[in-house]
C-alpha cells in the first residue's frame, strides 16, 4: 500500500495549503498567519496546511 504523494517541490521552508483532491500546492507563504490570509481571500475551504521542511533539515522522530 502506498501513501499520499504531496507535490511540494520548490516550497522548502514555506507554509503551504495543499488541495486535498490533487495533492498540489494551492497557496504558500512564509508564515501560518500570512497563509491563512491568502487562503481566506481565495475562498479555499478544503485544504491541508503544513510547513515544508528545508532539504537539509534533520528528521524529527518521536515525542521529543
Image: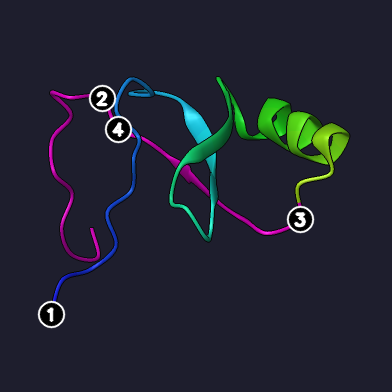
Q: Is residue 10 above or below residue 38?
A: above
* Residue contact at pointers 4 and 2, CB within 8 angstroms: yes
| Of marks 2 and 1, the one in the foreground | 1
Residue under the point 34% across and 40% down: 7
**Mark 4 vs 1, N-terminal side:** 1
Callout 4 secondary element:
loop
- Which residues fall within the magenta stretch? 45-64
> Chief secondary structure of the magenta span?
loop
Callout 3 secondary element:
loop
State the CA–CA distance, disc 4 to disc 1.
Answer: 25 Å
Residue under the point 37% across and 23% down: 13
State the CA–CA distance, disc 1 to disc 3.
Answer: 28 Å
Say few, some or many: other residues with alpha carbon within 10 Å of mark 4 (under 14 / 14 to 19 / 20 or more). Answer: some
Say few, some or many: other residues with alpha carbon within 10 Å of mark 3 (under 14 / 14 to 19 / 20 or more). Answer: few
Residue under the point 18% across and 49% down: 60
State the CA–CA distance, disc 4 to disc 2.
Answer: 4 Å
Q: Which residue is mark 3?
A: 45
Q: Which residue is mark 4?
A: 53
Amino acid at each position: 500500500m502506498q501513501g499520499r504523494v504531496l507535490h511540494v517541490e520548490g516550497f522548502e521552508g514555506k507554509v503551504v495549503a495543499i488541495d486535498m483532491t490533487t495533492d498540489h500546492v494551492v497557496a504558500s507563504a512564509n508564515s501560518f498567519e500570512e497563509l491563512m490570509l491568502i487562503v481566506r481571500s481565495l475562498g479555499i475551504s478544503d485544504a491541508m496546511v503544513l510547513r515544508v521542511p528545508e532539504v537539509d533539515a534533520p528528521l524529527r522522530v518521536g515525542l521529543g
